[in-house]
Amino acid sequence: MPVRDFSIVQLHKLHITACNVARAAGNYMREGQLRRRKVVLNTREKMNSVDLVTAADEGVEEIIREAILKEYPDHDFIGEESYSAGEEKRFLLKDGPTWIVDPIDGTVNMIHMFPMTAISIGFCLNSIPTVGVVFAPFLGGQGTLYSAIHHPEGGAWLSEFGHDGPSTPLPLVFPPPPLPVDAPKGCLFFGEYGKDRRDNPQSNLTKKAANFVNMATEIGGRGGKGGMVHGIRSLGSSTMDMVYVASGQGDIMFEAGCWEWDVCAGIAILLQTGGIVVDSNPPAGLEESDPIPMANLGGRRYLAIRGCSEDASGRSPRTQQEALVREVWKRTERLDYQRPG
């Protein structure tokens, strides 16, 4: 089906499918955690000892793949585990209808039974995240679902599931309040150390650690790089980091080293709630007065700023967001993440 033929009715159907599939996969995960009371969870290393995969990751991806392709056999599907197991490492997204799925983001969290674990199901049209569903099966009684359709007639919603069934979906707050006047001062900042743990002065790990300290330090500290943010949050899940910023529960997400399946669904929610996502490295040749382009979904570097409303000075949301992006860039090291192969 050509991209131009997708209507809001069809997008709502896609959204319902993704929500139902995410819930089913979440139930599978919850049952697996219950079985762990009797059986040791087997894990396998990918890149290193913090880059882990379990049978649950592969099982959840298979559940999602089969359900989606049964409903939409002509759509493309990119899943973390099947991509990781394959030899092709190029960015595979094209303009046609494509599902991008992380079956379990926060595998290490799941292994330790820390609840920041999410199923991320994104759907792209024209390479833009258009439908996003993120289900956190261990938050709340029976899980918490964030979702959105990025469309003028779409929306963004939060549903919590208890033992008595789902709550009525609540629209995410819109329009959210302005950004703090002296941002990043007063912001809540999300970021991850990532899986690249090499120890040298120019490593990504060393630079990320410096970034976190810069953002937390008092104004004027660290050679003028101090950001005095309210707090730094590292949840062990880029998906949950993005969703909390998208829903206005955080202000900034600065991440590099993750992949399109970690952020695709969250970006759809972020865009629908008025947020922006740009490259966490300043694009080469970008002038101070130039508009800042959206991040390349496959670029492995993402700086997300929540949506906001016009401030007391009359600054538009986009003006506030781009000003904050430039302030973050001034305080952060340039990170180098490439696609392998």
Image (spheres, helix red, strand yellow):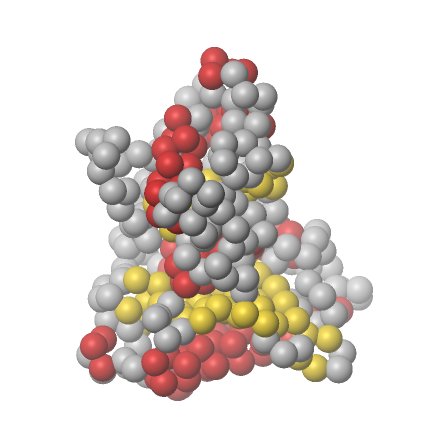
Vertical position of residue 196 compared to residue 238: above or below: above
Q: Which sits in the foreground, 123 or 269?
A: 269
Q: Is residue 206 above or below residue 112?
A: above
Q: Residue at x 35, y 63 (%)?
A: 129
Query: In this rendering, does residue 76 appear at all?
Result: yes
Q: Quadrant of the N terminus?
A: bottom left
x%, y% of residue 173?
Answer: 54, 62
User: Is 17 left, or right, of 294 in this rendering?
Assistant: right
Q: Residue at x 49, y 36 (%)?
A: 181
**Foreground: 77 or 164?**
164
| Location of residue 137 by image quarter | bottom right
Residue found at x 45% / y 45%: 311
Q: Position of residue 258 (x, y in %)?
A: 44, 47
The image shows residue 108 at horizontal and vertical percentages of 62, 50
On the image, the x and y values in percent for residue 126 come to: 24, 66
Q: Residue at x 26, y 46 (%)?
A: 293
Please tell me in which quadrant of the rendered image residue 145 appears.
Answer: bottom right
Q: Residue furthest top?
A: 223
Q: Confirm whether residue 31 shows in the render.
A: no
